[in-house]
Image (cartoon, rainbow, N blue to C red):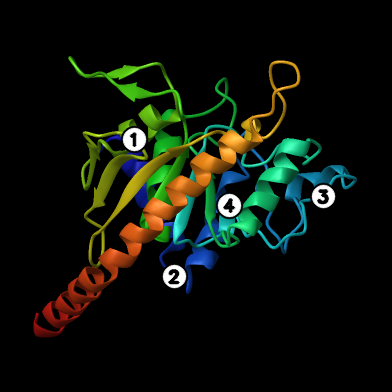
Amino acid sequence: MDRTTSFADSLRDLIKDCGTTEDGLRKLREYERHIQGVWHYPDDLDPCHDCMKSGLTKHRLPQVGIRGYVGTGPFTIVSDTPSGDVHFEKRQAKLYYSKLKAHGLESAHLMDVFNTASSTRDSDEQKALFLVQIELVKPKAMLVMDMASRPRKRSTGWHYCGPLQTVQMYFQTEGFTFAIDPDFHLRAATVTCGAQKGAGFSFDVYTIYHYTKLTEHRGSRTWESDWEKRFTDVLSMASLRLKAAEPKAELARRWHEESQRMS
């Protein structure tokens, strides 16, 4: 058994008795807090554990009802750095949470490809945490903050380097498939998961600008309108595809339940 599988099995055992998805996410968050240099994962109900411990309570999570790490979907939003700066001091982090609220994404699950600094992280543990979160949340659509990565057209691999490549690497493991979309415009890929227990699931992956684009760059130019347009275009496409998939998902659920009953 490789180390990633060992970590994943331990994490699944940790959350197996949790009654709800949110309870499972809270268990995972408690586990992550033993990791050196782990990012902060506050939510709209609980203050930041590390800020409270250190007495750093001047800058609080924007009180707009964003569930953050304990959000249960249907959308999952993936960053490569904390989903909001450490103490929410910067305009871009506060504006990001306000944008999520404005688009009705209070329950979106916010996660990162890495939850700690590169000098301290265990890559196998990070991969296991990512995969177990996905198994638990079962997203209907994933938005990855990466507008740089592009698949090569005449060979394998990628142009540039971004979190989308890490996401692909994570899903190149037993039980998952990561199929790159040939068009690669709004939709980047489709992920299929043969769940460890119960019915499998699948979801589309889209790319959006990183939340740090919600600030000024290159003198007086603002990127907020660019960020907003890409975000709304992706949400529109993803929502239409989710609506079209609902009847198929219901048939698959009923088929699975009937199979379980007959077995």
C-alpha gap between disc 3 and disc 1: 36 Å
Q: Position of residue 65 (x, y in %)?
A: 69, 63
Residue 29: assigned label: 4
The amino acid pointed to by label 1 is His
C-alpha gap between disc 2 and disc 3: 32 Å
C-alpha gap between disc 2 and disc 4: 16 Å
Q: Are marks 2 and 3 in contact (CB under 8 Å)?
A: no
Q: Which residue is mark 2?
A: 17
Q: Position of residue 248 (x, y in %)?
A: 20, 69
Please tell me which residue is depicted at 81% across the width and 38% down the height of the picture. Answer: 89
Residue 60: assigned label: 3
Mark 3 vs mark 1: in front: 1
Q: Quadrant of the N terminus?
A: top left
What secondary structure is found at the residue carrying circle 1? Answer: loop
Mark 2 vs mark 4: in front: 4
Q: Position of residue 158 (x, y in %)?
A: 31, 19
The amino acid pointed to by label 4 is Arg
The amino acid pointed to by label 2 is Asp
Q: Quadrant of the C terminus?
A: bottom left
C-alpha gap between disc 4 and disc 1: 33 Å
> How many C-alpha atoms fall within 10 Å of the one at disc 3: few (<14), some, or many (≥20)?
some
Residue 15 vs residue 216, the one in the foreground: 216
